[in-house]
Image: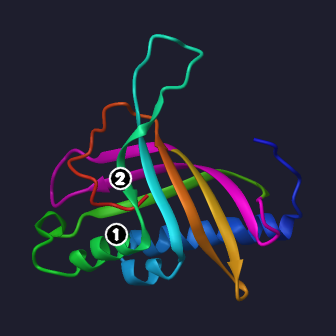
């Protein structure tokens, strides 16, 4: 990744956009969160595998936990507002922590490539154990009508074995 020095205003603007996204997700404002996604979004989480070669990639791009479009994500969001989303009843408490935001110019003047680290924590009912996922995200954010939207997101979990009960969250 070729990291360029961007003006601090742009860095702050994009970082605040990511924080706003985390806030909406943490507060279960999923329909509002959908408004931050472009109509042509590509939302992907490839598998991480354990390999013997320390220098090789341990990401398997041919297999994914999900490869979603805006239509797929919208269906998942709308399901959360129904009684059939039993895994969300009672609603779990969740937090998205975003850090290490690095930004570079994208392929178009109005797009930027954004790399960030994430930590997702979730607790359910009165269970003692919490669930967590952590890793890195690669986004393409686009400026549209004075606001930002996510055009692409690839999520790289650090765990090769996920320790969460399900993938009903958005990362």
Residue 128: where, in percent of width, then height? Answer: 19, 47
Q: Position of residue 26 (x, y in %)?
A: 40, 69
Q: Along the horizontal axis of the image, is 121 left or right of 59?
A: left
Which mark is on residue 72?
1
Check disc 2 and report the residue beneath it: 66
Q: Position of residue 157 (x, y in %)?
A: 44, 41
In this view of the protein, can residue 29 be seen by the observer? Answer: no
Q: Are marks 2 and 1 in contact (CB under 8 Å)?
A: yes
Q: Is mark 2 on a helix, strand or loop?
A: strand
Confirm whether the magenta stretch covers residue 128: yes
Residue 67 versus residue 19: which sits nearer the camera?
67
Q: How far apart are marks 2 and 1 (CA)?
A: 10 Å
Q: Quadrant of residue 8?
A: bottom right
Q: Residues within 10 Å of mark 2 (few under 14, many from 20)?
A: some
Judge by depth and name the residue closer to the eye, 124 or 42: 42
Looking at the rendering, in which quadrant would you find the N terminus? top right
**Is residue 84 among what the camera can see?**
yes
Q: Residue at x 31, y 55 (%)?
A: 122
Secondary structure, magenta segment, majority class: strand
Instruction: Say which quarter of the image contains residue 168.
Output: bottom left
Q: Which residue is drawn at 16% across and 81% down?
A: 82
Residue shown at 64%/61% (left/top)? 140
Residue 62's tag is none
Q: From what the image shows, is residue 87 above or below residue 117?
A: below
Left/right of residue 43 with respect to residue 130 in the rendered view: right
Residue toward you, 131 or 36:
36
- Asked if residue 15 lies in the magenta stretch, the reply is no
């Amino acid at each position: 990744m070729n990291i360029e020095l961007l003006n601090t205003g742009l860095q702050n603007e994009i970082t605040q956009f990511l924080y706003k996204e985390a806030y909406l997700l943490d507060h279960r404002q999923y329909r509002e969160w959908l408004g931050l996604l472009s109509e042509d979004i590509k939302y992907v989480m490839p598998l991480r595998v354990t390999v013997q070669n320390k220098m090789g990639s341990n990401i398997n791009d041919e297999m994914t936990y999900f490869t979603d479009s805006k239509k797929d994500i919208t269906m998942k969001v709308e399901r959360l507002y129904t009684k059939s989303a039993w895994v969300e009843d009672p609603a779990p408490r969740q937090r998205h922590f975003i850090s290490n935001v690095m930004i570079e110019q994208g392929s178009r003047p109005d797009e930027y490539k954004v790399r960030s680290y994430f930590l997702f924590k979730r607790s359910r009912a009165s269970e003692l154990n919490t669930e967590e996922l952590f890793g890195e995200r690669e986004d393409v954010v686009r400026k549209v009508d004075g606001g930002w939207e996510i055009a692409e997101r690839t999520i790289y979990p650090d765990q090769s074995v996920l320790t969460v009960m399900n993938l009903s969250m958005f990362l």
